[in-house]
Image: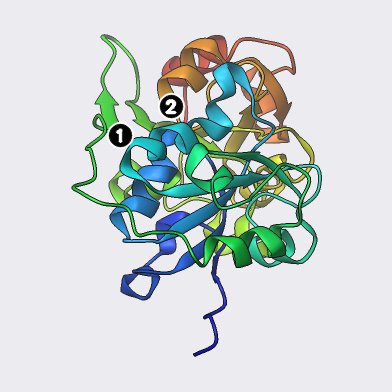
C-alpha cells in the first residue's frame, strides 16, 4: 500500500481527527504549546517552522519536548519557507533542526521538507499519555486600568468576549493561509504578536489596521514565541501599525510600555 502524503495544516490549531496516525507539516512555530497540540491530535510525527528560533530557542522548543514521548519532529528554516504556509514549507522548505527521534530515522538539517516528511512516514507512533502544559490563557485586571489584559499563548484562545481589551499573544504575526479572516477572533483595543523572524511574520498588522485595531509585533530574539507573558514582559517592538503608532508605539520600545499605555488609554 502506498504511503499516505503528509497532512498540511497552516496552523496546528486546525488539526482534527484526520491527523491521527499521520505525518503533519504545519505552518505553526515549533514551540512547546504547538508541539503539545500536535501530540494531542495523535500525529505520528510533525514538521514545524522554526520561527527564527529566537529567544531561548523557543521556536524549536517543542522538538526536545516531544523526544521523551518518542515522537519524531523537525523544523523548517523560516528563511526557506514562510511561517503559516504549510504548502510552501513542503514545496521549498529546508530542515534546520531535528529531534533525536527524527535523527534516528535519518533526518538531518539541510534536507528538503518533502524528503523529511517521507522519512517520517516510518516513524513509530508515540506512546503513553501526552503531558499537560500550564494554562495558556490568563485574564488580568490591573487596578485602575480602563480595560483587561488578556494573555494567550496561542491566538486561537482569543474569545469574542475579548473585544475592546488588550490582547497579548505568543503567536506569530503572520497571516496564515493568506486569509484575512484569520487575523484575530475579536476586535481588540491592542493586539501583540511575535514576528517569528520578520518578513511575513508581521503581515497581520496591516490586516488588523483595516479593522481599526492597533497591533504590533515583538522581535523573536527578544521574547519566547508561544509564551504570551514573554511577549509582554520581555518583548521589544519590531513592527507597529498606524493605529498602534497613535497609541505611542515605536519600534524598539518595550512591549510592556505599550501595554501600559493601552491599558490606560481613553476611547475604545
Question: Looking at the image, which residue is at 71% across and 35% down?
Answer: 241
Question: Looking at the image, which residue is at 25% across and 51% down?
Answer: 127
In the orientation shown, which residue stands out farthest toward the bottom?
1
Disc 1, SS: loop
Left or right of residue 243, residue 17 in this image: left
- Is 113 above or below relative to 4? above
Query: Residues at badges 1 and 2 in contact (C-beta under 8 Å)?
Result: yes
Left or right of residue 2, residue 243 in this image: right
Task: Give percent across and percent down for residue 210.
Answer: 66, 52
Task: Give percent across and percent down for residue 265.
Answer: 48, 19
* Whether residue 43 is visible: yes
Left or right of residue 189, residue 116 in this image: right
Quarter of the rendering containing residue 20: bottom left
**Mark 2 residue crowding within 10 angstroms, few (<14) / some (14–19) / many (20+):** many
Q: How many marks?
A: 2
Task: Give percent across and percent down for residue 208.
Answer: 61, 47
The residue beneath circle 1 is 136
**Mark 1 residue crowding within 10 angstroms, few (<14) / some (14–19) / many (20+):** some
Disc 2, SS: helix
- Is 29 above or below relative to 143? below
Cα–Cα gap, marks 1 and 2: 8 Å
Quarter of the rendering containing residue 90: bottom right
The residue beneath circle 2 is 228
Q: Sequence-wise, which precedes: disc 1 or disc 2?
A: 1
Quarter of the rendering containing residue 118: bottom right
Task: Give percent across and percent down for residue 85.
Answer: 66, 59
Question: Looking at the image, which residue is at 72% across and 34% down?
Answer: 242
- Is 64 above or below relative to 257? below
* Whether residue 192 is visible: no
Amino acid at each position: 500500500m502506498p504511503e499516505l502524503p503528509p497532512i498540511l495544516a497552516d496552523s496546528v490549531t486546525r488539526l482534527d481527527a484526520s491527523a491521527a496516525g499521520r505525518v503533519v507539516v504545519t505552518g505553526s512555530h515549533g514551540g512547546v504549546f504547538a508541539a503539545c497540540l500536535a501530540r494531542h491530535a495523535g500525529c505520528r510525527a510533525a514538521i514545524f517552522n522554526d520561527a527564527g528560533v529566537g529567544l531561548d530557542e523557543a521556536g524549536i522548543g517543542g522538538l526536545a519536548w516531544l523526544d521523551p514521548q518518542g515522537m519524531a519532529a523537525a523544523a523548517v528554516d523560516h528563511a526557506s519557507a514562510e511561517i503559516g504556509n504549510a504548502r510552501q514549507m513542503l514545496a521549498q522548505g529546508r530542515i534546520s533542526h531535528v529531534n533525536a527521534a527524527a535523527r534516528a530515522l535519518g533526518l538531518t538539517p539541510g534536507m528538503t521538507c518533502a524528503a523529511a516528511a517521507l522519512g517520517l512516514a516510518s516513524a513509530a507512533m508515540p506512546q503513553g499519555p501526552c503531558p499537560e502544559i500550564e494554562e495558556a490563557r490568563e485574564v488580568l485586571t490591573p487596578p485602575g486600568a480602563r480595560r483587561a489584559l488578556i494573555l494567550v499563548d496561542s491566538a486561537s484562545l482569543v474569545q469574542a468576549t475579548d473585544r475592546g481589551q488588550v490582547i497579548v499573544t505568543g503567536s506569530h504575526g503572520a497571516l496564515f493561509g493568506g486569509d484575512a479572516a484569520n487575523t484575530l477572533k475579536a476586535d481588540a483595543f491592542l493586539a501583540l504578536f511575535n514576528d517569528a523572524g520578520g518578513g511575513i511574520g508581521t503581515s497581520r498588522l496591516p490586516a488588523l489596521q483595516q479593522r481599526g485595531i492597533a497591533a504590533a509585533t515583538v522581535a523573536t530574539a527578544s521574547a519566547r514565541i508561544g509564551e504570551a507573558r514573554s511577549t509582554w514582559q520581555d518583548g521589544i517592538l519590531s513592527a507597529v501599525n498606524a493605529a498602534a503608532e497613535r497609541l505611542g508605539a515605536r519600534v524598539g520600545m518595550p512591549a510592556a510600555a505599550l501595554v501600559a499605555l493601552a491599558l490606560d488609554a481613553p476611547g475604545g
